[in-house]
């Protein structure tokens, strides 16, 4: 347990201090939301209607940004070998790394999402719902991304491959995330069912992701 | 012959060489019978002759999913038993499964144009088949990225098993969203909703497609083994020329 906490703190410190990788995702998210009106025109009604979907797409892409460094930096400096040889089960070590990654990259997105909603002419209530769905859905994105990151590091040249492998698997999360946001904002479907399915996807991914990533690392780096 | 005996590639090659002509013959026969039956099947009272596209579309969809199932079983063989042929089987199945999935998408699009008035709708089942196709392409990309075939095979096996979670989503997405695409009508509780006059040719065509898949797969496995032998010989040759 102590090892896992140490690993968590180490990853958070690395993300926050070294190179400031933590906030780049949020900055990227901001830029995507800024580019959007240039692409589709400054029609406020239209922006408000597609706002939730665009915030979700932005969050999805932003969460991909830092993923390829998740295991790659540890692999390069050798600490991944130490983590794999450590006493803590690899699955839990990976879960700790995932938690650190989520806290430093996904959580800032959830925090800035309401601000971006402001730019997209969304109601205050809508913005909180989008932030809520992002809060519930981003763990799934992180944990699915784990698998891609682990596979990519075993193949060495996996940088671009990562996005190709991970994005199709995130489609259900995107579907239910946007469905829940739209249900909360426009109706007529109730908010509950898509939101609970989104939570279920996150919980399932939290279980499957670390196991698959650990299997990928064990089989790939032996 | 036990599965473990096939671990010897030479023995597998001999067996494949003997089985392939018979499989190819059975495939041609099944296609001959199936196509004639499909041609003579009555037109649908609403869809007219376009219903005949279903004789290609439905088996292609089944085989597209069958391909991933085969890959998942092979993935177990690779990861759990380390069977040397399992990863050959998985790798050989990828492009074939992708081709059948693409065939399913194209025929569906051709059918949708006159029937739904559009080539593509973002319906749940169509979308999940498209996702299946994209995932096939992802696995192909992964195989191409890997420098070492054994390492690539294990990575692909894990990706395949993770992707296998998507297969039930494809099957049940119709019931979840239940939009434009008609719900499953062959495999369901009670009797099939299709008249036997159309169901029989459909099943014969499905058998023909299955035989075609198995023939292509066996041939592709043989090619893959030979390709690996060539690679090994080249590596040995390169070693010798350096030494």
Image: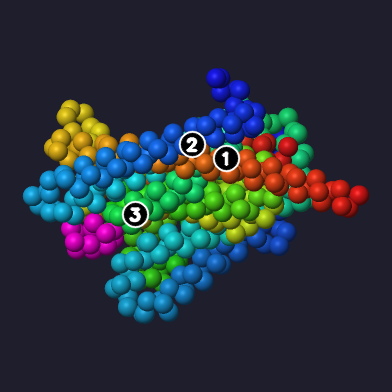
Instruction: Determine whether label 1 and label 2 are within 8 Å by CB.
Output: yes
Label 3 SS: helix
Q: Looking at the image, is mark 1 or mark 2 earlier in the sequence?
A: 2
The residue segment tinted magenta is B109-120
Residue B20 marker? 2
Crowd rating for badge 1 (residues with CA inside 10 Å; few <14, some 14–19, many 20+)? many
Please indicate whether residue B161 sits to the left or right of residue A179 in the image: right
Q: Looking at the image, is mark 1 or mark 3 earlier in the sequence?
A: 3
Tell us which disc is closer to us: 1 or 3: 1
Label 1 SS: helix
- Label 3 belongs to which residue? B105
Residue B222 marker? 1
Rendering quarter of residue B36? top left
**Residue B62 visible in the current orientation:** no
Tell us which disc is closer to us: 1 or 2: 2
Who's the residue at 48% across and 57% down the image?
A: A60
In the image shown, does A71 or A127 lie closer to the viewer? A71
Please indicate whether residue A211 sits to the left or right of residue B123 in the image: right
Q: Position of residue B155 (x, y in %)?
A: 61, 42
């Amino acid at each position: 347990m102590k090892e896992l906490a140490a690993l968590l703190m180490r990853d958070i410190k690395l993300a926050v201090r070294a190179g400031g990788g933590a906030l780049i995702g949020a900055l990227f998210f901001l830029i995507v939301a800024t580019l959007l009106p240039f692409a589709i025109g400054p029609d406020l009604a239209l922006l408000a209607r597609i706002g939730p979907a665009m915030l979700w797409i932005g969050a999805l892409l932003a969460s991909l940004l830092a993923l390829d460094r998740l295991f790659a930096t540890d692999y390069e400096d050798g600490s991944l070998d130490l983590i794999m040889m450590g006493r803590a089960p690899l699955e839990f070590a990976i879960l700790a790394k995932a938690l650190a990654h989520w806290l430093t990259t996904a959580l800032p997105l959830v925090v800035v999402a309401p601000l971006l909603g402001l730019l997209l002419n969304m109601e205050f209530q809508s913005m909180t719902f989008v932030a809520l769905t992002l809060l519930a859905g981003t763990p799934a994105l992180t944990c699915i991304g784990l698998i891609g990151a682990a596979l990519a590091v075993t193949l060495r040249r996996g940088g671009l491959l990562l996005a190709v492998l991970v994005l199709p698997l995130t489609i259900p999360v995107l579907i239910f995330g946007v469905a829940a946001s739209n249900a909360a904002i426009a109706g007529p479907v109730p908010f509950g069912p898509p939101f609970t399915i989104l939570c279920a996807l996150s919980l399932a991914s939290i279980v499957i992701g670390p196991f698959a990533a650990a299997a990928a690392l064990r089989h790939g780096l032996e | 012959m036990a599965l473990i005996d096939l671990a010897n590639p030479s023995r597998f090659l001999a067996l494949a060489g003997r089985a392939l002509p018979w499989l190819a013959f059975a495939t041609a026969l099944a296609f001959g019978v199936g196509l004639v039956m499909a041609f003579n099947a009555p037109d649908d009272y609403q869809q007219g002759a376009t219903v005949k596209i279903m004789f290609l579309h439905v088996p292609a969809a089944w085989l597209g999913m069958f391909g991933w199932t085969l890959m998942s079983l092979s993935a177990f063989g690779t990861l759990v038993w380390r069977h040397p042929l399992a990863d050959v089987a998985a790798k050989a199945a990828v492009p074939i499964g992708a081709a059948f999935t693409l065939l399913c998408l194209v025929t569906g699009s051709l059918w949708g144009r006159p029937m739904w008035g559009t080539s593509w709708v973002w319906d749940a089942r169509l979308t999940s088949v498209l996702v299946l196709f994209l995932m096939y392409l992802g696995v192909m990309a992964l195989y191409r990225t890997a420098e070492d075939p054994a390492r690539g095979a294990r990575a692909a096996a894990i990706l395949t098993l993770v992707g296998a979670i998507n297969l039930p989503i494809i099957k049940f997405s119709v019931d979840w969203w239940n939009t434009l695409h008609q719900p499953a009508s062959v495999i369901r509780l009670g009797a099939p909703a299709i008249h036997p006059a159309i169901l029989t040719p459909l099943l014969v065509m499905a058998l023909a497609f299955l035989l075609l898949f198995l023939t292509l797969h066996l041939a592709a496995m043989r090619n893959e083994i030979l390709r690996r032998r060539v690679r090994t010989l080249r590596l040995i040759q390169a070693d010798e020329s350096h030494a």
